[in-house]
Image: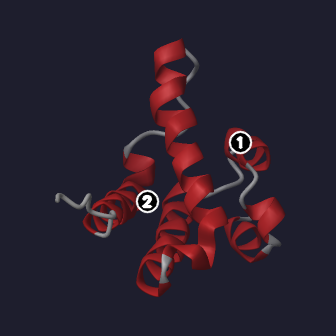
């Protein structure tokens, strides 16, 4: 099922509601999912973030909902930080890359 997720159309692949159903039903191998999502993000980092803005937005939303918002609200833990270790690493690299290329203010 994880492979089907990776090969389906982007509007389904990067839909958090669909992923949530698959994860809660234990139909997604989170280790494979993390590696596949991290691979897409790595390709986006190397080719320019615009090449997969949907994947980047999805990954950011995924981390926010499951790792930040969920535990703070007392929701049951479905996905842990360990489940998304590769994705978090790539997101960190993307953030560092974006800060490096941030426009600098000119001082006169």
Cα gap from disc 2 to disc 1, whole angstroms: 17 Å
Q: Does residue 57 sit above or below 75 in this rendering?
A: below
Quadrant in the rendering for residue 42 = bottom left
In this orientation, which residue lies closer to the viewer: 42 or 84?
42
Residue 30 lies, in percent from the top left, at 54, 55
Count residues near mark 1 (Cα–Cα under 10 Å), then give few for <14, some for 14-19, many for 20+: some
Residue 107 pos. (x, y %):
17, 58
Q: Nearer the N terminus, badge 2 or badge 1? A: 1
> Crowding near pointer 2: few (<14 within 10 Å), some, many (20+)?
many
When the figure is inspected, residue 36 is found, relative to residue 18, above or below; the finding is: below
Q: Which residue does the numbered mark 2 point to in the structure image?
A: 87
Spot the residue most to the bottom: 47
Instruction: Return the x and y of residue 105 as percentages of the image width and height.
Output: 26, 58
Query: Circle 1 sits on which residue?
Result: 20
Residue closest to the far front: 108
Q: Secondary structure at mark 2?
A: helix
- From the viewer's side, name the closer residue of 57 and 18: 57
Q: Is residue 101 left or right of residue 1?
A: left
Q: Are marks 2 and 1 in contact (CB under 8 Å)?
A: no
């Amino acid at each position: 099922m994880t492979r089907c997720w990776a090969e389906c159309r982007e509007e389904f692949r990067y839909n958090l509601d669909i992923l949530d159903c698959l994860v809660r039903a234990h139909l997604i191998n989170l280790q494979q999912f993390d590696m596949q999502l991290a691979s897409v993000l790595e390709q986006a980092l190397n080719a320019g973030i615009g090449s997969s803005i949907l994947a980047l937005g999805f990954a950011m939303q995924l981390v926010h909902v499951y790792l930040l918002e969920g535990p703070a609200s007392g929701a049951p833990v479905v996905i842990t930080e360990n489940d998304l270790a590769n994705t978090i690493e790539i997101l960190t690299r993307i953030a560092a890359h974006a800060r490096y290329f941030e426009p600098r203010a000119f001082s006169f």
